[in-house]
Image: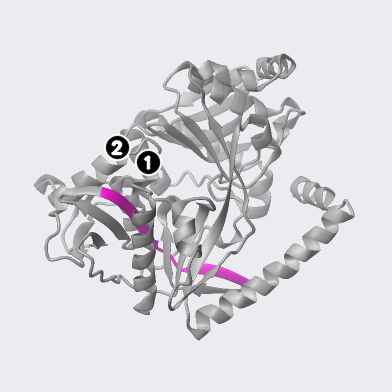
Amino acid sequence: MPLIADMRCVNLARCHIPLAHQLDYPAHQKETAVHTDANRLAFEFKTPATGGAEAAEQGDPWYSALNDTLAAPRFIGSETSPPAEAARRAWIDCLKQDPMGNAFCHPDMALSAEMARGLSPLVYARWQGQKATTLGVLLNRPLPVRLAPKVRVRLSGYKLLESEVVGDRGTESMETLRDSIVQLLATGKAESVFVEDLDVASPLWEALTRTKLRGVEVFFPEEPQPHWWIRFPEPPEKYWDHFSSKTRSKFRQKARKIEEFRCFRGEHEVEEFLAKAHQIGTNTWQSKRLGTRIANSPEEIAFWKLIAHHGAMRSYVLAHAGRPAAFALAEQWRQRMIPQEIGYDQSHSEHSPGTVLLFRILQNLIERDCPRAFDFGYGDADYKHLFGNHQVLSAPIVLVRSSFRPLAVMWTDWLRRRTSRVLRTGLRKVGVLERVRRRYRATG
């Protein structure tokens, strides 16, 4: 297989999902979901009147360093629930014990991201005493749905953070999460719940799709697509056996032509990294079509400093002739690494910077602190075929309340997508689809 030079600037965890456009969400509907099962709690984070330095001095466990506010939990659905400090500690312990967890699901990151928008998430939790066995964060997000090229509507609702739960992902836990979602939609306070990238063989997919849900309709915005991973063997050096000696030689030859490679992990390195990534991001094909994905804003800097503070940032920059050429904004939590954004400067395309960047990243991972898995995220691509060694199918899924407005919106969206899918299939059959895509990416 030829070396790939078009690892463009994409949000790997969210690519190919039109519904998941980054939007400015207004602060609204700080609502609750009531659960009667004592084993199942949802708590909502409110912003009290006091905060900032006073809260920090008081040692409040829900203090947010990102924007000097408090995010104090309020438990709902049980007369006996852990106090705030115990809840936060249990959340962190649950995440630490999950080898395939995600740093974005840490309470500091989850709350800071929401509080910066003035929003409140719901947190689904199952407990054994004061020990959390399963946690899932539902972010307060309206669902943007495109009905026509210039016609968009929003359904009020929630989005499952990182499309996953922390801790126990077994059938029983996922069925109780499903029941909580159904109850939330039944209250009428939300029209939708969106899961962006869900493994079709997972217990949660089974729970959401296997049986008819009363008062809820399930929609599938996209067909299932490959979700590629790298599963590192033991010892990790054996991963290179995945390639022929000829391909490994080509990797090394390409890498020698781009001499500068650096890993960024510390809080003090965040601003420098984001400045370089922003510089690269302004000359990717996505930036010309969709705008720059790395804002390098004070909020983004603060958020990634928080990631680095918890030891989870592991990002990279590749440079050629003293100029940044490619970047990967990534996080590693325990045994799983997730690149959140990756891209390269098109002016360096002759040197295959995307391929070289990923080759050098994998070398770095194998040399030190190698995770068990490298998660490429939803969607297919040639470079994932080249480097990946494990594949599942995943897809977005939307649950909506069975009432006129959300059903009318989603069925209209389904018809539009169906028409578009038929058109793409026709173009693929006559052999012009890939040419159209390449021309789209090549033109500014």
Could you say which is closer to the camera, residue 56 or residue 146? 146
* Amino acid type shown at disc 1: Ala
* Amino acid type shown at disc 2: Lys
Instruction: Answer yes or no: is residue 324 visible.
Output: no
Judged left or right of residue 3, residue 435 is: right
Mark seen at residue 96: 2
131 over 305 or under it: above or below: below
Which residue is denoted by mark 1 in the rendering?
Answer: 103
Instruction: Answer yes or no: is residue 390 visible.
Output: yes
Whether residue 260 is in magenta: the answer is no
Whether residue 138 is in magenta: the answer is yes
Q: In x, y percent, where is residue 380?
A: 66, 45
The residue sitting at 27% across, 48% down in the picture is: 133
**Number of residues whose C-alpha sits closer than 10 Å to that of mark 2, classed few (under 14), some (14–19) or many (20 or more):** some
The residue sitting at 41% across, 68% down in the picture is: 26
Characterize the magenta stretch by its predominant secondary structure. strand
Judged left or right of residue 390, residue 265 is: left
Judged left or right of residue 319, residue 99 is: left
Q: Indicate the quadrant containing the N terminus: top left, top right, bottom left or bottom right.
A: top right
Give whichever of discs 2 and 1 has the lower sequence position.
Answer: 2
Cα separation between marks 2 and 1: 10 Å
Could you say which is closer to the camera, residue 286 or residue 430? 430
The residue sitting at 79% across, 46% down in the picture is: 438
**Number of residues whose C-alpha sits closer than 10 Å to that of mark 1, classed few (under 14), some (14–19) or many (20 or more):** many
Splitting the image into 4 quarters, where does residue 424 fall?
bottom right
Q: Write down the region rendered in magenta.
A: 133-148
Mark 2 residue element: helix
